[in-house]
Amino acid sequence: MTSKSFLLLLLSLYSLSSSAQLYTDAEDLETDVNASNNGGVFIVSNGTYNDFEATFENSGSATNPIIIKAESVGGVLLTGESKFVFKKSAHCILEGFVMDATSDETLVKLEGCHHIQITRNTFELTTTESVKWVYIGGVWNDNTLPFMYPSHHNTIDHNIFQNKTTPGHYITIDGSHEDDGSDEIYYQSTHDVIRLNHFRNNGPRAVNEQESIRIGWSEMSPSSGFTIVEHNLFENCDGDPEIVSVKSCDNIIRHNTFKSSYGSLSLRHGNRNLVEGNFFFGNNKPVGTSAAGSSLYTGGIRVYGTDHVIINNYLEGLNGTRWDAPITLTQGDAIDGQSTSYSKHFRAERVLIAHNSLINNTHGIELGFDNNNNYNKDIKDITIANNLITGSENALVSVVDVNNDPGTEIEWQNNLMYPIGNAVTLSGATSTSFDTTEVRTIDPMISFNSAYGYWKSTSSTPTFNLGNAVASTIVEDIEGQPRATLSNPGADDYSTATVRFSPLDSSDVGPFAYGSLSFNEPIKVDLEIFPNPVHNILVIKSLPPSVKMGHITCGNTGRMIWRSNDLSTSSVEVNLKNYPNGTYILHLEGHTWISSHKILVQH
């Protein structure tokens, strides 16, 4: 196929159906969307629009949604006080806009909505005020059914959130409340999904309220959110000590990648949350200093509350301590079930921490920090099992304030700890010590895998038989490979099975990462791609029968230069003769997988 044919194919993908209409005016768009009685496609013509504001109060259906989209992804730039509001709406899709606004308003707000999808947009907002950029909540002053209850089943996927400089969150999952005249009960929005987004450049550090994602808030924390945050990339997210702040119950944070970010993933309020399969990389980012003079660290996972499960996470090169240690269990100032002062720090209780890898961090697992004697509630009933910790400085496990040694409140099982250089296994302990059933000090025999960018187990890595009944239910490792009962300590279990999950980069997320929302997890697919570097014709062979779509984007700009929905043959050729030298990204998508590959063009 010639490059001209490819261009015609690309243009045809954005051609309008007979029922779709082009819009250049926000009021006309709002009027027609709100008058629709059977869904429909409403397309904003490519171009730049200032103060493009619209409020939608209508619903499509699962089979006929209301689709509000840019003529092409990234082709519509909205400036000034542009914003979208969905109120009491359902089954709507907002797709493909670039919002580069300068206002004090939320960019996209959902009030009492369900099954809204916010997809393939780029968000940026220049303001001096505290603003929540994308907000999901209820209709706060409407106590009539069903709007007194929160939103639910909304999706935020394949977006870029970038360059935040003031307080407020990139994404806020809030909710609604019920007022019976004597008491208020708060409910979080439920079953929302935040997936395959790129969060970057959130800073400088604010005192509070500049998380990249906040799920719930203190008074809402007893409610269950069932929020899923998965397959997102966080880079240089420094605005708050909590990069992602979880303040409710029954949420899942999995398979995300955190790079070069000051702060931690914080289970700040709530119970029964799952943190699984995340990658944390310090990337040699030095200790920073905030405007207030406090030290800024690259951190890992901080835990409060009860019945959490923290498994299969990989934490490397982090310099954090105290609040920001790779895994930190501080003291608390309240106990679940004994206090309703939900802004307090509820002690960690009945928490499972298993199969995590802590590699070459400045500190390791830190326990007992009491914040200058302000927290006097000891952690209770913690299981720390089958983790791998190795490093060359400080302690792999440290009781920060020695009077707060948890002793028998932590059950240690089958951990491998290997101090090298000046590191020690344990410091600050007055009653805690390790026997060989709790901690073994042996070489983990791991190896740095340059293809994946992290330290992995090898065929020589020791295997442990994990006896804990709860931890033995962890049937996969961080890469999504089956984990045997006799398995390696740490996040990665040595296997030759297909790697389903690995650290994310910018080609895996955002508006031009064409992963379908119907897939379960992104995986790697083996292909023949040659020559690479390419001079003229790029050949892609061994395409699996399940491939549905492919496209190529420029690595510097994200601009799409080729796309095809017809990859039914096992081989395809792409003419790159007329494109400048540089790095390009080939994206392929099947029904249950996505795959990205870097291509170097050299003429």
Image (cartoon, helix red, strand yellow):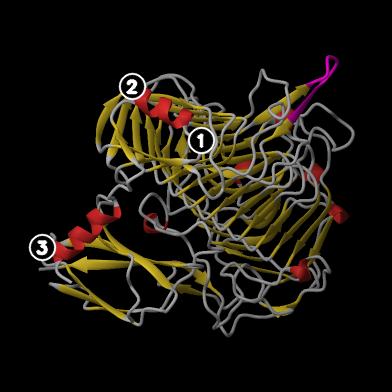
Q: Earlier in the sequence, mark 1 or mark 3?
A: 1
Callout 1 amino acid? Asn
Q: Earlier in the sequence, mark 3 or mark 2?
A: 2
Residue receiving disc 1: 37
Q: Position of residue 533 (x, y in %)?
A: 20, 73
| Local secondary structure at mark 1 | loop
Residue receiving disc 3: 578
- Crowd around label 2: few <14 · some 14–19 · many ≥20 (10 Å): some
Q: Position of residue 324 (x, y in %)?
A: 60, 44
Q: Quarter of the image for the N terminus: give it.
A: bottom left
| 488 or 68, nearer to the observer | 68
Distance, label 3 to label 2, CA atoms, is 38 Å
**As drawn, 89 above or below 540:** above
Marking on residue 313: none
| Local secondary structure at mark 2 | loop
The quadrant where residue 87 appears: top right
The answer to whether the residues at label 1 and label 3 have Cβ atoms under 8 Å apart is no
Horizontal side, residue 70 vs residue 106: left or right: left
| Local secondary structure at mark 3 | loop
| 221 or 409, nearer to the observer | 221
Q: Nearer the viewer, mark 1 or mark 2?
A: 1
Q: Nearer the viewer, mark 3 or mark 2?
A: 2
Q: Residue at x 54, y 75 (%)?
A: 446
Q: Nearer the viewer, mark 1 or mark 3?
A: 1
Does residue 343 appear anywhere in the picture?
Answer: no
Which span is picked out in magenta?
Answer: 179-186
Residue receiving disc 2: 51
Outermost residue toward the right in this view: 338
Distance, label 1 to label 3, CA atoms, is 46 Å
Q: Residue at x 43, y 34 (%)?
A: 203
Does residue 213 appear anywhere in the picture?
Answer: yes
Q: Earlier in the sequence, mark 1 or mark 2?
A: 1
